[in-house]
Amino acid sequence: NQKVVLITGCSSGIGLALAARIAKDEKKRFMVYATMRNLSKGEALVEAAGRTLGRTLEIKQLDVCDENSIKDTSTPFGSVNAGMGMIGPIECQSIDEMKTVMDTNFFGLVRLLKEVLPDMKRRKKGHIVVISSVMGIQGILFNDVYAASKFAVEGFCESLAVQALRFNLNISLIEPGPVITEFERKVYEEGLKTDLSKADKVTADMFTNIYLKNYKQIFETLGQSSEDVAEHTHKIITMDNPPFRHQTNTLYTPMTTLKYADPNGDLPIDTFYKMVFEHDKVFNASLNFLKLLRWRSRKSFTMEKDKSN
Ligand code: NAD
């Protein structure tokens, strides 16, 4: 009575780690269809899969940007991971490059769900697990188009989630912070190659001397491994009542909490600004944030106490 899990983008990073982790499920509850755009890049997955290959894991071809390769995909369970990043000032990026990011990260998910959702509805069984990002809830400097693609993913899934409930289906968005994968390396290298001639001096300087300079450090201090994200995702997949959203990086959670702490939306923008441009003020900003959190938790504690009296 194995559940079929289809995962996209399994030749590297989170998809690879996730495919291997689910195939190695202690209770052998899953049959993994680990898919990738280009089958010739399957070597690392074959190695990670080990003895599960041909038993609880099969490798298949799937390009999320090609409807023909998605056709006839039917699965009671699902997991969408394939994605790409893009950084830099928008005046230096072409609309075509931006469209490729949207096409992969957003329409890739839409294409797959259009194919598998009707079947899932008929069976009233399934769990759509989407690798989103903390950038699906919060924009980050110079990640404008990437964040937009993940916001699109989140809005799409949040809208579908209500309908899914009616069919007993679950949807979960996995929201990692920085993860050390090929993704990070590719994005950084592409970033270094950005032709900044179309950007003004202040913007070009901000991108090169502030953003790119801190990029590696952010991944070094906050970065998680793919295996860690896979472990979190495996837990979500095996839960009876999986949550709609799950952040995998507790070190990053305080940043996303800023968004919910201020309905006006200024607190996170202000804090990011200070982090980037006024390093010395970050300490005070963090302190204010902690005070706010303490105030909120004290308030809810008092409310709980009031209720029990
Ligand atoms: P990665 O580059 O190692 O993996 C992405 C995979 O998607 C690659 O194997 C790539 O070949 C595949 N892919 C790209 N276009 C495809 C297409 N059209 N069809 C099929 N496969 C395609 O990077 P990763 O970090 O493992 O990224 C996986 C997911 O995690 C992405 O959705 C990414 O947005 C998300 N994410 C990554 C980070 C991070 O810091 N690395 C953080 C949060 C979320």
Image (cartoon, rainbow, N blue to C red):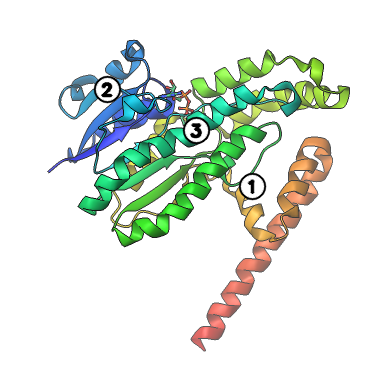
Q: Nearer the viewer, residue 152 or 72?
A: 72
Q: 290 and 84: which one is in front?
A: 84
Q: Secondary structure at mark 2?
A: strand
Q: Is residue 251 visible?
A: no
Q: Quadrant of residue 63?
A: top left
Residue at x 60%, y 78% (from the top left corner) = 302
Tell me how far mark 3 sits from mark 2, CA to CA: 20 Å
The answer to whether residue 274 is seen in the rendering is yes
Q: Nearer the viewer, residue 234 or 154?
A: 154
* Residue at mark 2: 60
Closest to the camera, between mark 2 and mark 1, is: 2
Q: Position of residue 172 (x, y in %)?
A: 40, 48
* Above-or-below relation of 15 to 3: above
Mark found first going from the N terminus, 2 or 1: 2
The numbered disc on residue 54 is none
Q: Which mark is residue 255?
A: 1
Mark 3 vs ligand 1: CB below 8 Å:
yes
Q: How many marks?
A: 3
Decide which of tag 3 and tag 2 comes sooner along the chain: 2
At a point 30% along the width and 41% down the height, the residue shown is 116
The crowding category of the residue bearing disc 3, from other C-alpha atoms within 10 Å (few below 14, some 14 to 19, many at least 20), is many
**Disc 1 marks which amino acid?**
Met
Dot 1, how many residues are within 10 Å of its Cα: few (below 14), some (14-19), or many (20+)? some
Q: Dot 3 corresponds to which residue?
A: 105
